[in-house]
């Protein structure tokens, strides 16, 4: 039927935004229920002890979240880079939507420096909300660039420096988020967030992205 073809780039970004924000609302709604059950006085460290069955359900739910985000991303792109860009854009939009809903419903977090449990796989990610927001904004911008500017003329082949830099950035960021895993799991209050390795990881990630995307295209064969 006329007018029923696949959406253009702007339309695709709008639909991804709609899905990410709606999914963020669903995620926030689950957390509102959990906090009502386990943190009736308001969320704060040390963490409440969840029954083993509930903890297992929550961890599988988080894994299912990643599967859903990737499944939608797979249908939104025609190649690996477009699909990765869609995943980044969706993940960031979902995360920001989640915090916007929590603030609207619970007036939480009180500030961007309020501590939160950010994720549970492969361990407890703990850090100020700001640390998650900065990553989310970075993913939205990077994913949006990939989705809006990816063409055969701009497509490049990642080299060993791109892969190596990406691996180092990932280790720095994951290490920062997991730095307080032991204390959180033991029922203690996190001491401090490792902002220096976190900042280096985020900066390196952006440098790697810029090098991979904006340098002169290299084509195979």
Image (spheres, rainbow, N blue to C red):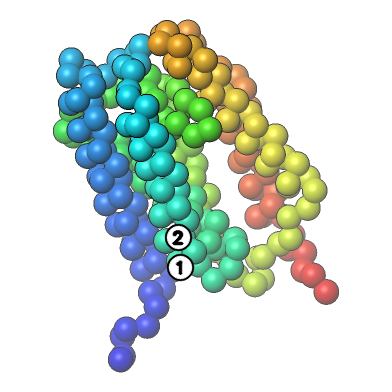
On residue 71, which mark appears?
2
Q: Is 89 rendered above or below residue 78?
A: above
On residue 39, which mark appears?
none
Q: Badge 2, how many Cα within 10 Å: few under 14, some, many 20+?
A: few
Quadrant for the N terminus in the image: bottom left
Q: Badge 1, how many Cα within 10 Å: few under 14, some, many 20+?
A: few
Q: Quadrant of residue 176?
A: top right
Describe the element under mark 2 as helix, strand or loop: helix
Point 53% across, 61% down: residue: 83
Q: Position of residue 153 (x, y in %)?
A: 66, 71
Task: Return the residue at label 1.
Answer: 75
Q: Quadrant of residue 80?
A: bottom right
Point 41% across, 73% down: residue: 8
Report whether 220 appears left or right of 175.
right
| In-front residue for pair 2/35 | 35
Point 78% across, 45% down: residue: 161
Total marks in image: 2
Report whether 188 appears left or right of 173.
left
Q: Position of residue 145 (x, y in %)?
A: 52, 56
Report whether 78 appears left or right of 30.
right
Q: Is 108 rendered above or below residue 65?
A: above
Point 63% across, 36% down: residue: 170
Badges 2 and 1: C-beta atoms under 8 Å apart? yes
Q: Which residue is at the far bottom?
A: 1
Q: Is 34 rendered above or below residue 45?
A: below
Quadrant for the C terminus in the image: bottom right
| In-front residue for pair 154/110 | 110
Q: Is residue 107 visible?
A: no
């Amino acid at each position: 039927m006329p007018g029923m073809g696949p959406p253009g780039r702007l339309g695709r970004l709008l639909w991804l935004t709609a899905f990410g924000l709606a999914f963020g609302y669903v995620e926030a709604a689950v957390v509102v229920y959990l906090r009502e059950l386990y943190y009736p006085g308001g969320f704060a460290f040390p963490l409440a002890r969840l029954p083993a069955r509930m903890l297992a359900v929550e961890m599988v739910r988080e894994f299912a979240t990643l599967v859903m985000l990737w499944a939608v991303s797979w249908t939104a792109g025609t190649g690996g880079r477009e699909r990765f860009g869609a995943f980044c854009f969706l993940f960031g939009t979902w995360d920001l939507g989640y915090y916007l809903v929590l603030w609207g419903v619970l007036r939480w977090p009180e500030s961007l420096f309020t501590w939160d449990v950010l994720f549970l796989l492969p361990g407890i990610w703990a850090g100020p909300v700001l640390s998650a927001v900065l990553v989310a904004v970075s993913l939205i911008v990077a994913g949006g660039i990939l989705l809006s500017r990816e063409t055969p003329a701009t497509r490049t082949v990642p080299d060993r420096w791109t892969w190596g830099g990406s691996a180092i950035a990932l280790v720095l960021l994951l290490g920062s988020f997991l730095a307080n895993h032991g204390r959180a799991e033991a029922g203690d209050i996190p001491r401090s967030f490792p902002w220096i390795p976190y900042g280096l990881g985020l900066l390196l990630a952006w440098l790697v992205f810029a090098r991979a995307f904006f340098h002169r295209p290299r084509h195979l064969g």
